[in-house]
Structures are given as structure tokens and as C-alpha cells.
Amino acid sequence: MSILSETHKIVTLNEFIINSQKGFDFATGELSGLLHHIGLAAKIVNREVNKAGLVGILGAAGSNNVHGEDVQRLDIFANLHFHKAMRNSEFCGGIASEEDDDCVIYEGERARNAKYVVCIDPLDGSSNIDVNVSIGTIFGIYRRISPVGQPCVEKDFLQPGNQLVAAGYIIYGSSTMMVYTTGTRVNGFTLDPSIGEFCLSHPDIKTPLQGSIYSINESYQSQFSDGVNRYLAYCKEIEPFTGRPYNSRYIGSMVADVHRNLIKGGIFAYPATKDNPQGKLRLLYECNPLAFIVEKAGGMATDGKNRILDIQPTNLHQRLPTYLGSTAMVRKAMQFVQGEE
Ligand code: AMP
Ligand code: P6P
């Protein structure tokens, strides 16, 4: 019996990416290269996020540290490194980022001939960094619709989520994980810092059809619709024999809330409010990639009425009300939101 039996075989992210490519005889390796560079940038960002607590010693973000070096805000740092990774990959024509007002179109022949573009939130939930709460990177990869050979254009980024080629997130938490799908299974890779590799730890993630966790910021109750507040009351009802069926869990970092609910089952909701009639979360680089992942894991993702992935974007930073997670729970929430309950 070998020390490491088959069941203990380490599969690194790069090995998994290359093995997955073998299923596509026509593949040139461009998507594999792009995914590899995203994994590399994730490790660079992880290194900085993990020492964020020391920034106070080295100097608050935006100031100079003891070495006289500029201390960057981590979300700006993350944006810089994902841009560098995408440019260096030479398989990405440009990025639409939460941190940039407009989409950034890359120069050069390789970028003009690249067939993919990326929508990304480089560091979502970054306000939680200085209190050591999990934060995340969210990305979606599209095949460009403008002609290869020219610089890509804004409409390449304004595609509905149902056109995504791949989507994923990195969660910088008690451990750092990269979870992604290219349209069939959802697979999770945990970073082993001792070898500097993301290793397959959660193959073929399926989210439970029904969960017991509801994640919503209830402090907005006075601004929610009657339907949303009736759904909240439903979640708090005590059932005669089974007791309280639901538990409230809300971290305030979308990647962390969605990741927990993906694994355990549950619903994440960020409804419309009187102050934000379109909700707070952004379609291109928060909701579409996470909706793509949740659906491929067997869950559901809507804006309360429509499937998120079918929404035609009109603006790079447009927002929408968001309900995603276990299918039975999202369906029930929609019944309340649409006034059927
Ligand atoms: P490529 O020519 O490398 O851009 O690949 C063409 C298509 O093959 C991609 O858009 C995917 O649909 C599929 N493909 C290629 N490589 C991979 C991979 N590593 N994992 C999953 N799908 C892949
Ligand atoms: P609120 C973080 O700022 C974020 O964009 C998401 O990660 C998170 O789910 C949401 O905002 C939290 O917003 O209004 O509940 O603090």
C-alpha cells in the first residue's frame, strides 16, 4: 500500500486545468493560460491580504510605511495585479473591473488577437479587511463578440451571463480557495501555502436543493418591499413540530456568504431598497459570475423575477436586486417578492 493511495492524490489547479483541456481537441490552450494566470494573481493577492493586519505596523493604506514605501489600498493592489496577470497572459483583450470607471482595453497585437475578455471585482468586501473578515475576488470570462484582430470594445463586456465561458471566485478566508466552473462542474481548490499550490479539495460541488440559512441585511427592513418583509417573517416562523427551520447568517462579504451557502445550502438576498431601487450588487462582476457558479452547482439565481444570467446588461456598473442559492429557497422567496404569498 503506497503512502499516498489513489484517494490521497494531490491534484493541483494547473494539472486540473490541463487535464480539463484534454476534453477539447480543438483547444489552443488560451483558456487554460488565462485560468492559470488568474490562479497566479490570486496567490499574489493572497500574500498581501494575509499580511493586511500588519499594514497598521507598516503604515495605514495610502500612507508610507516604515521603509518609506507607498502602502496601497488592497483593492487597488488587487486590481493592479489582476490587470498585470491578464495582460501578461496575452489571452485577454481587456478587463471590466469594479475598480475602473471604464473597461480597460489592452494594447498590442497579442491583445488584439485575444479571444477572451474578463469582468472582475478584484477584491469584493474590502472594507472588511481591517477586521479580518473573509473577502474575495469574483471573475467571469467571455469570448469576445467583436472581431479578433481589432482592440476589443465595450460591447464585448456587456454580454448576458448565459454567455459566460467560465466564472469563479477566490475567497481569502480561514483558508484561501479558488472555486470555478467552465460550464459543467463546479470545482474548489484550496491553497496549500507550504507548497504554494491550489489543490483540488472540493470536486464537483453541488449545492443542496433546500437549505436552512438565509443571508440578508435585515437593518434595511424599513426600506424593503412588503413582499420581502413577508419572506423575512416566514423565515422566522416557528413550525409546531419541527421548530425554527431557518438560521440567519450574514457576513457582509458576498463571496463569503455565497460560498458558505453554496456548500451548506441557503439563500443570499440583497433586495431592492428605497435608497437603492436597483439593489446594491453589480451585475457584470458580482452577480453574473456567482449566478453562473450557483446554477452549475444546481442552485438558482434571480433578481426576484428574472433569471440573472438572462439579463442583457446595458451599463458596465449596473446594479440589480439579487436572490441566489438553494433552488427551493429562491423559489419561495420569489413567491413572496412577487406577491404570490
Ligand atoms: P481555447 O482554444 O484554449 O481558448 O479553448 C477553446 C474552448 O475549449 C474553450 O472556450 C472552452 O470551451 C474549452 N476549453 C479549453 N480549455 C479548457 C479548460 N482548461 N477547461 C475547460 N474548458 C476548456
Ligand atoms: P451591506 C461589500 O461591500 C458588498 O459589495 C458585498 O460583498 C456584500 O454582500 C454587500 O456589499 C454588503 O452590503 O449594505 O449589507 O453592508
Image (spheres, grey):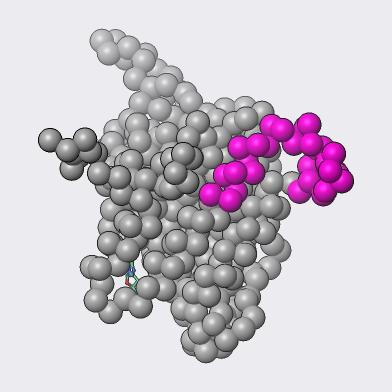
Residue 84 picture location, percent across and down: 62, 64
Q: Looking at the image, which is closer to me, 17 or 206?
A: 17
Count of numbered badges drawn on the protein: 0
Q: Residue at x 50, y 31 (%)?
A: 174
**Residue 4 left/right relative to 105:** left
Estimate the x, y position of residue 38 in percent, counting from the top left: 50, 59
Q: Is residue 79 visible?
A: yes
Numbered range of the magenta stretch: 43-72
Near-viewer residue (37 or 329): 37
Name which residue lies at 85% across and 39% down. Answer: 66
Whole-percent x, y for residue 86 in the image = 56, 67
At a point 47% along the width and 46% down the height, the residue shown is: 196
The C terminus: image quadrant: top left
Image coordinates for residue 259, horizontal then vertical, percent: 43, 39
In the rendered image, which quarter is residue 307 located in? bottom left
Would residue 68 be counted in the magenta stretch?
Answer: yes
Q: Is residue 266 above or below residue 30?
A: above
Q: Which of the pair 11/222 is nearer the observer?
A: 11
- Residue at x-position 46% and y-position 78%: 115
